[in-house]
Amino acid sequence: MYTVTVRDHFMIAHSFRGEAFGPAQRLHGATYVVDVEFRRPDLDDNGMVVDIGRAGEVLRTIVGGLNYRNLDDEPAFKGRNTTTEFLARLLHGRIASSIERGDLGPAARAIESVRVTLHESHLASASFDGRVIAG
Amino acid sequence: MYTVTVRDHFMIAHSFRGEAFGPAQRLHGATYVVDVEFRRPDLDDNGMVVDIGRAGEVLRTIVGGLNYRNLDDEPAFKGRNTTTEFLARLLHGRIASSIERGDLGPAARAIESVRVTLHESHLASASFDGRVIAG
Amino acid sequence: MYTVTVRDHFMIAHSFRGEAFGPAQRLHGATYVVDVEFRRPDLDDNGMVVDIGRAGEVLRTIVGGLNYRNLDDEPAFKGRNTTTEFLARLLHGRIASSIERGDLGPAARAIESVRVTLHESHLASASFDGRVIAG
Amino acid sequence: MYTVTVRDHFMIAHSFRGEAFGPAQRLHGATYVVDVEFRRPDLDDNGMVVDIGRAGEVLRTIVGGLNYRNLDDEPAFKGRNTTTEFLARLLHGRIASSIERGDLGPAARAIESVRVTLHESHLASASFDGRVIAG
Amino acid sequence: MYTVTVRDHFMIAHSFRGEAFGPAQRLHGATYVVDVEFRRPDLDDNGMVVDIGRAGEVLRTIVGGLNYRNLDDEPAFKGRNTTTEFLARLLHGRIASSIERGDLGPAARAIESVRVTLHESHLASASFDGRVIAG
Amino acid sequence: MYTVTVRDHFMIAHSFRGEAFGPAQRLHGATYVVDVEFRRPDLDDNGMVVDIGRAGEVLRTIVGGLNYRNLDDEPAFKGRNTTTEFLARLLHGRIASSIERGDLGPAARAIESVRVTLHESHLASASFDGRVIAG
């Protein structure tokens, strides 16, 4: 299995609902450093899993849709706890859609699975890892 | 698959027995920076794999049981080489027990597997990855 | 010159005022990973710049005063842009006061200067470096 | 499953053929920081996955065969794009051969799979992960 | 003293002349991860050392002038060893000129000194640190 | 001012005397990741602060003198607390002597100062920074 991983980041405000969150029930925020790993069993004709430059641009666009926002105000997240795990899954879905739409080029449709990891500090991270619908 | 990873560290002395260890047969020591990755297929009702704060406290307690010790003097390790791999497995067992006992909360019993990685320097690490007995 | 550096972090929400800030004028947030470097020309009787454990506790208390907060709601920051630079200076002042009060022990009053660095992502950081009033 | 990972690096020049590579079609270069992860289900009699010192030496020899070279001039790579992915696979094959030859000791023949990751910058990496022919 | 630091990278080929360079006399290459630290004694009216976003863009443009090139073919470096130290100094000069030209905004002319650090691997780096002509 | 920095590490056992050290009075150990920064105002004829390869070898020899040892058994440290700060100073002295003896080559005698930093974990480090007797 081959992989390629690219990194970017975004900075948001949010709060959590539920006693389990303790002081994180207050409005606070986070920098999320995001690693996206693309996987496929064979390389394309250029010898690539995915064009690293293009993957970086797609990731920049996707995190740009969350960057500098208060997630508590986003209608899409109404009534949801935007935990690091939840956001990893959200980004996974958006990257899978990008692959399907061909934003990463036609050859990238051979990508079989993707892992999205969000580092919230030097001590903690969360990820979602799952298949994408290969072309 | 969702994951959450938390980090802590401990500092110990030990020595190894066997020619393969060369100068590491002498009494020396190490700082182990520990990453524990918890995995499960679905999130709990709070949208979490595990409460990151609670996971950090459990990890702190577990590494606290080894911190600032000479492992050669610990009866539990008598006749064993406390290699990085061995210690990764040891911590995995203790974390699995914590999950079973409910130290990480009842919802954390849905955790299916755990990976424990010990970084012994900027150049080398070891890990143990295995299932835990899900509730 | 001797130094000791300890690390901790905090997570806050805030917004900025002024066109220069572009989209960061919206309410967003950040994880700040904080490094505090203590400096003095000679070691104390224990061979230390400062007790690393105690320095870590003092830093934890100080960042705890900001952690999980919306800085826009803090009266102390009314009308101020809580930039990374500003926060580095703020923490520097609080650490200097801790040293003066003796929170780091009497020997730590020989610390001459402190550098506080806040990493806001894997790409950017800011710091404040200045003297503290040595006892 | 147990793992051990060791790190080294090499510095090469190369160029790529194909429009997808944009400016990387020009002769340029890279530092590749290499992580090799060895995996096996049980430890050997010394309590090891592999002798970390020996693994480091084997890796040093293998990356030494590429270090300070222009890959465009290497007959072995004629007509190939020496992408990060391609090089990860190449190193994987050379490490697998080392294990088979016994360069890592007879016990290391129980290693079942290896992952080779090449970090080309603080933002991007590629890997190849696959089985090795266990003894 | 306040600082702000931003990071970017570039990838080049080059070779060195002189026996001291050993195998690095062959054409090879490097990824340089670049940190630029800007320093000034007081903050501007926005509470900033320099606009981090703008500093990042200026750095991107400057490293873009070297990225994906064979430095041996650049007339500007004819007869020079483009060591990491040399390149740190080169980038320092270009950043100083950017500040003078006002590319970082008028307030950035109060920057007094800049440190440019180039990381060539996980084991080695070089820097140039010097004053810039403050406006 | 130009700098070059190289990294290596060593692993030791030791214990501390004095109540301030708490549980670290017990025999324990540490991995120290060491960064040595060499500084001089001008480059040598090769465009270098110091030959990075040669600096790495000198550092390897120096840390090799401490590696895999119990510092409590070393006569040279009798009655001393081998704190991270103390060890940073010790290594500084040994590197200064190496420069004077010409181990780093005659041109390296122009090095004016050296900073030695020892990272004892992902959270704490100590350093000694001082002049060396330039040739």
Image (tube, coloured by chain):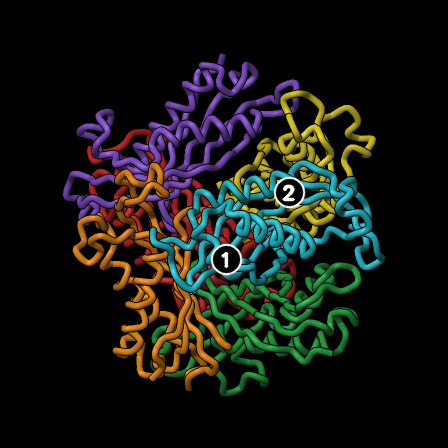
Chain colours: A orange, B cyan, C purple, D green, E red, F yellow
Q: Residue at x 38, y 38 (%)?
A: C10
Q: Residue at x 41, y 18 (%)?
A: C97
Badge nearest the viewer, 2 or 1: 1
The part of the image, by quadrant, that contains residue A107 is: bottom left
Q: Which residue is mark 2?
A: F32
Tell me if residue F70 comes above or below residue C109 in the rendering.
below
Tell me the tag on residue E121: none
Q: Residue at x 75, y 78 (%)?
A: D101
The part of the image, by quadrant, that contains residue A133 is: bottom left
Tell me if residue D104 comes above or below residue A117 in the rendering.
below
Amino acid residing under circle 1: Gly
- In the picture as drawn, the residue positioned furthest to the right comes out as B19
CA neighbours of label 1 inside 10 A, class few (<14), some (14 to 19), many (20+): few
Q: Which is more toward the observer, D59 or A129?
A: A129
- In the picture as drawn, the residue positioned furthest to the left comes out as C19
Task: Where is residue C22? Give x, y as percent.
Answer: 18, 48
- Determine whether, in the image, residue F38 is placed left or right of residue F95: left
* SS label for mark 1: loop
Q: Is residue E74 visible?
A: no
Task: Where is residue E56? Give x, y as percent.
Answer: 31, 52
In three-dimensional space, the C-alpha distance between marks 2 and 1, rounded to whole angstroms, equals 41 Å
Q: Residue at x 54, y 62 (%)?
A: D33
For disc 1, the chain is: B
* SS label for mark 2: strand
Q: Which residue is mark 1?
A: B135
Task: Where is residue A121? Give x, y as percent.
Answer: 42, 46
Amino acid residing under circle 2: Tyr
Task: Where is residue D85? Give x, y as percent.
Answer: 49, 75
